Image (tube, coloured by chain):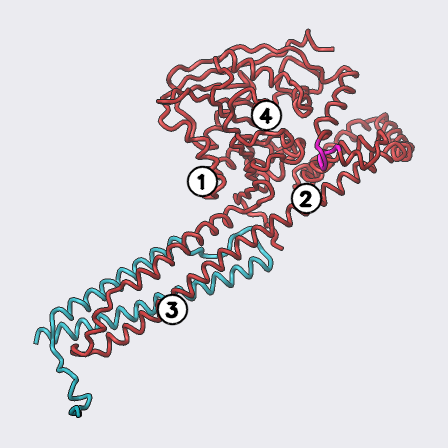
Chain colours: A red, B cyan
Amino acid sequence: MTAAESHPNELTVQVGYRVSTEQQAVQTALLRVLVGELTGFVARVGMVDRAGTLLTPFQANPLPILRADAAIDEAQTSLLRAVNEARFAESTLTAATLAYAEAERRAHEMTRGLGGLLGYGLGLLGPIAVQWLLTPLLAAITGIGIGALRPGGAELLQAGAAAWWAEHRDILSEPLTVELVRAAIMGSDDALGGALHVPPALVLFLGDQGLGVTGVSTTTALLLALANGAGALREAPVTVTRTGTATGTVTAPTGLRDRLARVPHGVPHQVRVERYPVPGQDDRVEVFIGGTVDGSLFTGEQPWDMTSNVHGAAELQPASLRAVREALAEAGVSPGDRIAITGYSQGALVGALVAASGDYDVDFLLEVAGPSGQVAVPDSVTHVRLDHTADLVTALGGDVQGAHTVQVRRDGVPADTGQTGPGQALPAHDYTFYLQTAELADQSRHPEIRNAIEGANIPLRGAARGDASDWLAERQVSDARE
Amino acid sequence: MPRLIACTIPDVMPLTVPNPDTLALLESQLAGLRRAIAELDRCTLAHLPTEPATGWRGPARDAYAIVLERLRGHLIEVRANLVRAQTLSAAAVAAEANAVAR
């Protein structure tokens, strides 16, 4: 079977299990047109006026025209062979793509099946393994502690840890690591079932391989309950304040990069709402939601934090989601307004939750680097995901659920330009790197990407300049929910 | 009894008659061939994939590469035949034009 190689700037597009590189899709489309054109060309060559041949008995030198006639016949024969060959080439390419998709589907099912069994086994045998590992681990920790107590020991330990991290941090940006994490996330409900000694058949039946009653969100919700008990990751009410307004001056976005470039970065606001009047139609609303600002596990005033991430993964009501709803209401967006949403990282998760809620008429969703694969975005939404295969954050949301979702993937990590900072732990999650990917997608001729971009742009055709409002959300930590 | 008339082929072969209508028909054929070649070139340039897609390897890619090469060969053959027909038609036009001029 085919194997994909890593090519800089080459995008891979997946819709359900249908996978194709941009060039494969473009070549299939080219060959389809070529077959049509050559078929028409057979008729056009047949229509070349050959009446002169009939008059050869009356010509001064009939030999050339008779030989020309034979050459036209040969051209027609070769042309018919070329038409057949072009059809065959198109079929070969389509068959290869389908076979690739089938192999992808089987590999995926096998991985998930094994992942589920492995997860169940780990959950079942985990407590025994922990006891088995605990003794040497305690000894190691004691040894490290004694070493740290020696003069200069702590500094040496810190320097050693920093050096180890500098040498190994690339492991977080390996596509294999990303896929293992994704498999672990998808197997987490199985592990939980194993730990609770639930019969394996029942775990499989209720899990994502079966009915889908339990899944990533169930496990996250249980972990969240445990964390809440320990005083972490507690949610609280949220308020939003308008920090900026532009009236009648904003031009409508076009394409993916333009949309991603409008996503805010937490300070001074996390949400932007744009409204465009479209002649003869209802207004069009474009919503832009930023990514995580605060990485702390303890609930703070910043709603774009880990508390919201975990609540979002559990498909509950994170503060960031409530803040977006509040901002939409304050901006005069009501259920029924046609909305397009663009979100980066946590903003993608929040955008997916808004679309999945069904409370708004969302018809386009651009998720960039979102930990949101398991959120069920309705089929009525034109749904595009930009994912980097080395971006660990995207794996935290598990597999992408939507069979209609256009996943645009890109390999690699950004070149070290110094802009991203040498200490950045997840370079493939970098916003500017995603901006480049969005630009590549805009330039792509892949039919799935072109259709999706058209789907986003068509409702804005003829739109006048619009209004924009920026919204800053704050969590009321004094009201943290018990 | 019907009377048989014996004749030989040279007897019924008409004499060469230079004719402007014949010249016009040959010129029409030549123009048609020129258009066909231009059309083929445009079509090939616009729609024939130059090489198998990158990011792909293995037997399926090799099979596709072979099919693509054969297709390119057929199209080269079509063009060569059309060019030959064009050259020969041009020669016929020139000969006929000379005959008409005389």
Q: Name the secondary structure under disc 3.
A: helix
In this rendering, would B75 be left or right of A405? Answer: left
Indicate which disc, 1 or 4, sits on the residue closer to the N terminus.
4
Q: Which residue is mark 2?
A: A108
Residue type of the residue flagged with mark 4 = Ala
Quick one: label 3, few (<14), some, or many (20+) residues within 10 Å?
Answer: some
Q: Which residue is mark 3?
A: A77
Asked if the residue under mark 4 is in contact with the one under mark 3, i.e. CB atoms within 8 Å, the reply is no
Q: Which residue is mark 1?
A: A443
Badge 1: chain ID = A
Q: Which residues are magenta?
A: A206-212
Marks 3 and 1, how far apart in space? 39 Å
Asked if the residue under mark 2 is in contact with the one under mark 1, i.e. CB atoms within 8 Å, the reply is no
Q: Which residue is depicted at the point 57% across and 13% down?
A: A473
Q: Position of residue A369 (x, y in %)?
A: 59, 32
Q: Do the residues marked 1 and 2 share a common chain?
A: yes
Residue type of the residue flagged with mark 2 = His
Quick one: label 4, few (<14), some, or many (20+) residues within 10 Å?
Answer: some
Marks 1 and 4, how far apart in space? 29 Å
**Tally of numbered tags:** 4
Q: Nearer the viewer, mark 4 or mark 2?
A: 4
Q: Do the residues marked 1 and 4 share a common chain?
A: yes
* Quarter of the figure with the N terminus of chain A: bottom right
Q: Position of residue A233 (x, y in %)?
A: 71, 18
Viewer-proximal residue among A81 and A310: A81
Q: Quadrant of residue A148?
A: top right
